[in-house]
Structures are given as structure tokens and as C-alpha cells.
Image (tube, rainbow, N blue to C red):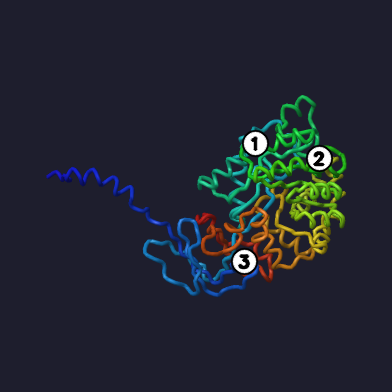
Amino acid sequence: MRCTYPLALAAALPIALAAAPALADTTVVHAGNVIADADSQPTGPATITVTDGRIVSIESGWNPAPAGAETVRLEGMTVVPGLIDLHVHLTGDPGGDFWKDAVEPEEWGVVVGAKNAAKTLRAGFTTVREAGSAQHSGFSLRRGTEEGMIEGPRIVAAGPALAIVGGHGDVSGFRPEVNAVLTSGYTCTGAVECAEKVRRASQNGADVIKITATGGVLSQQGRGLEAHFSDAEMKSIADTAHSLGLQVMAHAHGARGIEAAARAGIDSIEHATYLDEAAAQAMKANGTVLVPTLMAFQGVTERLGQGIYTPVVEDKIRAVAETAKVFMGRAYRWGVPIAFGTDAGVFDHGRNAEEFALMVAQGMPHREAFASATTVAAQVLQMEDEIGRLAPGYSADMIAIAGNPLEDVTVLEDVEWVMVRGRIAE
């Protein structure tokens, strides 16, 4: 017998179904300890409730899950905020073969990036700042991880870096006509053109503006590591970015280049190898943050003498090797604000947390090193109300480890479980 509805009911049924609230996606985590942030102490047994990607509550004891919720049992583990790396290159792997720019399509970077995004997430890093990629590869990864199509961290992406013509960040090492074909289109000369390139980067999807303010170690020029952009150019970049609500991160090695970038209003200095006290004072006066990338120096030093780098690059690596072991410690003693970043891609992705041991070796206390990759890094990203700590309303970005990173931050090298945006990494 055929079942029929009254006409009015049949008409109303689709509307009622559309208006019904969707079933909330809830996960309940039973943790042996919770460390909400670097200023907190371990809580003892606790229950974290996550609904639709956000933390709803953190309660003492192991409370039963509501009907339909998934329960994750981490009773022997400590749950802490997901880590933040402010300087990665997901679309690249380590090596000195600069010529690959001439033979590999930009699309290949998305394939490499998908691999590295998964490795980075499983290493406990739930947010990263992608510090330079081809025009669309970093942005494609950003969208893929946000929509859950690619396993990986939240990505804040710069896209192509702004550079001077022929400087670090521009293409070099080939015949002039090949250099011209491979250039990113983001080199600039003069304050007006540099402002235009910032606006173009913003138009094309950049979350942050990356510039190469000085020479670099891994580029093919044998020139020094001091300032590339003029003062007027750097100020134009900073002012234009800030007018668009964007921050500027500057690759910088030489002391005078660092000082000039800080005075221009650049928001963070990446590397800062030859930082001196005058440059440090300029950074403090202007609120410029240091992202030391100690693992970058570790990674390139490990590959010396293997035929990986060209002779000019090997010479530059050897020149910075000893300074790289002490400059962050000086910055810390001078009171420069320091946030966590590694330059993963210069070394193997997934080793990001090895940066912590290098920071501690240069004098940073374990608790502050932990803060540098959580609350401090979140502040640098202006996302301190979203990530960097565990609290109701925050994104459910958390990891589980054995041990207490407030006392020994190197326990973060061994991550047992990861959740990002409420999704558990497989």
C-alpha cells in the first residue's frame, strides 16, 4: 500500500529538515595531564571536550562522553597546545641543486608540499608560516589543509618573496635569459615599485609579506650578507603592508641590514646571524621579533663536503657556522623578543622540534622555549585568541607527549598524538 502525506505536510517537510540543526561533531579527550600554556602547571587527569573543531571545556577528572561522541584515551600522556613554526618552506626539500628551478614545474611544489605538510603535522606543529613559495603552491596547500583535503597544519602563507633584482630571493646562477624567464615577478627597485609589489602580493592572496632584506647563505652570489633594499624601499614595503593589514617578515643576516629593517618597521627578522647590540636595540625599540631558525644552520652544516652545495655556498656556510651557535643567546641576553621558527625545508621536514634543544643550548630556559612556539608565536601571527593555548573557544589544536616540556622542552621531539582544528591526524 502506497504511503501518502497530506499536501501541506509534504510541502513543509523539506523546510523542517533544512531548519533542523546538524548533529554536532564532538570528541572527548581523557588526558593524564593538561598544560594549557607556558604560564600554567600540569593539571592532573582532565577531560577536554571538543565540538565542531573548538574546545568547549577543560574539566578535572575523566568525565564520561555524551552520547554519540568519540572518546580519545590519553590517560598516560600530557596534552599541550599544538606547536607553531613561524618559518617553513613546505614546498621544498633540502639540497643544493638550485638548477631544479629550471626543470621542475611549480605544480610539483604542491606534491612535495602535501608530503611535507603531513610530516610537519605529525611532528606536532599544527600551525606554520610558509615563508616563501611559488605563486600558487603555498596558497593551494593552505586551502587544502583548511578544507581537510590534505593532512597538514594551518598554513599562514607568504607566496613569493620580494627581492632586489639579482639578490637573495631572485633567480640567479643561470644565463641571463634563463634568469629572466624563471624570475618570480616580485623583484622591485625604488619605493614606488616596492609598494606596488606588496599590493600585488596582497591581491594574489598573501597572508604575510616576505622580503629578503639582505644577502643569503644559500643563494648563488658570493656577495656579502648586508642590506639589499634601501631604507626608503624597506619603509615603503612596511608602510604599504601595514596599510593593508599585513605584517612583514624579513630574511636578514647582516647587522646593519637587520638594524635598517627594524627601523623601517619590519615586524620580524628571520635568521639574524650577525646581530650586534646596536641592531638588537633597534629591534627592541621597534618591537621587532627575532625568529632565529637555528635548525637551518644545523641542517646546512650537516651537508657540507658532500658535493650538495656549490663552492660559493659552501664558503658562506662555513663563514656563518660558528656565529650561528651563539647569536640567539646574545639576542636573548639583550632582551630581544624571540619566537620559534626553523626554516624547515633547508633541513628535513619533521625535525622541527629539534630547534628547542638548540635554543636551550644558547641560554633560553625550557619554559620560555615552549612559550616561543605557542603563546609568543601566536602573538606574532596576531592569532593569540585562536591558537597557542588550550582554553574554551580556542581552535582544538593540541598534541600529546610523554613528559613535561616546562621542565624539558626536548620531550616535544616525540609526539604521540595530534589534533588540528578538531581533526585527529591519522
Dot 2: within a 10 Å radius of its alpha carbon, few (fewer than 14), some, or many (20 or more) residues? Answer: some
How many neighbours does mark 3 have within 10 angstroms: few (below 14), some (14-19), or many (20 or more)?
A: many
Instruction: Give me the disc on residue 135.
Output: 1
- Callout 1: helix, strand or loop? loop
Quarter-wise, where is residue 111 in the image?
top right
In three-dimensional space, the C-alpha distance between marks 2 and 1, rounded to whole angstroms, equals: 26 Å
Q: Which element carries disc 3, helix, strand or loop?
A: loop
Residue kind at label 3, given as amino acid type: Asp
- Label located before the other in sequence (1 or 3): 3
Q: Position of residue 159 (x, y in %)?
A: 66, 40
Instruction: Calculate the distance from the C-alpha at mark 1 to the C-alpha at mark 3.
Output: 35 Å
Please report the residue visible at 73 percent of the width from the left and 31 percent of the height from the top: 183
Of mark 2 and mark 3, the one earlier in the sequence is 3
Q: Where the N terminus falls, by quadrant?
A: top left
Is the residue 36 above or below the residue 379 in the image? below
Q: Residue furthest top?
A: 177
Element type at mark 2? helix
Q: Residue at x 76, y 29 (%)?
A: 179
In the image, taking residue 314 as reference, residue 98 lies left or right, namely: left
Which residue in the protein does label 3 denote?
37
